[in-house]
Image: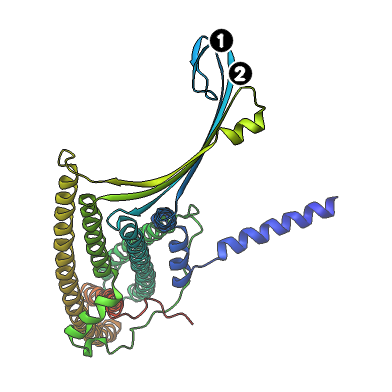
Amino acid sequence: MITKRILIFFLLIGINVFAQEKKWTLQECVDYAIKNNISVKQSELDLKTSDVEKLEAIGGFLPSLSGNANYSINTGANINPATNQFENQTFKSFSASANSSVTLFNGLANWKTLQRTKLNKIANEYRLDKMKDDIALSVANSYLQILFNKEQLKVQKNQNQITKENIKRTQQLIEAGSVPAGDIYELQATDATQEQQIISTENTLIISKLALCQTLLLEDYATFDISDETIDIPMTDIVNESQEAILEKAREAVKDIKIAESNVSIAKKDLSITRSGYLPTLTGFVGYNTRWSESAVLNFVDQLSLFDGTSIGLQLNVPILNGFSTRGRVQRSKINLQRTEFQLTQAELDLERNVYQAYNDVVNAKKSFEAAEKTLEARKLAYDFAKERYEVGLMNSFDFSQSSITFENAQSEVLRTKYDYIFRTKILEFYFGIPLIQKQ
């Protein structure tokens, strides 16, 4: 029994360690977010509703069938269903009927309704795809923000370690009488400032992880972490494409235009359906009925056979005046059609603006990153030169600290522009139809 408990104890420890060591990749984050997002689940329900609407539309072509039966005990003066005469006595009676009807013509409203359900399902599929794309972009942005904060933290800790080493060396020089005691004060101030920056970046890192956790609907904030993967600058020729070519690709890749176009098609179909209300409706029907009465001489079965009857015929309903109800529905459908056409035009304008903006963002982000790299290279040379001078006593601690700070800022700027360039490129590639994540 004790051995069993020990095994369970170590098994639980192993599970806990595994949970803490779990590090999420970008692909895992995107897949999990799409699978568990509430809005995605609701959109998937809309697709199921579209299937139900299609089934109902198909049912509109089928004939209706209904049956009813009635058993009663009559007292006083009542019409005997068997003799069709008034009888002032108590008797029992039974009647049954079955009726069926089918719409032969109603302005093709059934057919148009079926076509509308198909269009609506397509529109819901586009909405679901757009929702997944938006979630993927949001997750990628949060993921890259965490990576940036991690690398930023590494840079700050490395710089702080160098500062602490310089403090130790300066203390040794002071004790040897090579430099004045005041030289260490500036380095100590720099050390304190760097430690504050490290604490601030650590807090920023925690907040960025929390934001991604909330997007993923995860509750275990404390142990959540992403994999320490290196995302390099994407090797892409997307900026060599013309903006017009990217825009043309975006019309197919981005679902906004397709959604707007689907809404226009649905609105046109709605208008056609409401106009069917102006046309007459022709319905065919057939019915069967039979009856029995206790007071009749014949038995139950003979009465059902004797007193049965059938009916068959056509019914024509011609709309003449219905208080402008049909006219009002048609006018509302026309207004809704105009609204969806305006929305389509606006969606096209928005897409054009977004594509051009994304293109310019990539171009500017690339220039900023390249400029930051050049600045870092120059700052590195200046820092190395300042360090050499400081170590031989040709530079005071204040000037050396300033050189160290500018070098650290240059490193941070490279990181910032790098991840900004990566994300901007991903957005432009998305408009060009390139998947956000290239699955292996």
- Horizontal relation, residue 309 to residue 370: left or right: right
Q: Is residue 428 above or below residue 114?
A: below
Residue 426: where, in percent of width, then height? 31, 77
Q: Position of residue 440 (x, y in %)?
A: 49, 82
Q: Residue at x 60, y 33 (%)?
A: 304
Could you say which quadrant of the image residue 395 lies in?
Answer: bottom left
Rendered location of residue 313, percent (x, y) = 39, 46
**Amino acid type, residue under disc 2 in the picture:** Ser
Say which mark, if any, is on residue 89. 1
Q: Nearer the viewer, residue 376 or 121?
A: 121
- Residue 399: image quadrant is bottom left
Label count reads: 2
In this figure, which residue is indicated by the disc labeled 2? 295
Percent across and percent down for residue 280 are 25, 50
**Residue at the spot 34% in from the left edge and 81% down from the top edge:** 434
Q: Are marks 2 and 1 in contact (CB under 8 Å)?
A: yes
**Pick the front one: 97 or 223:** 97
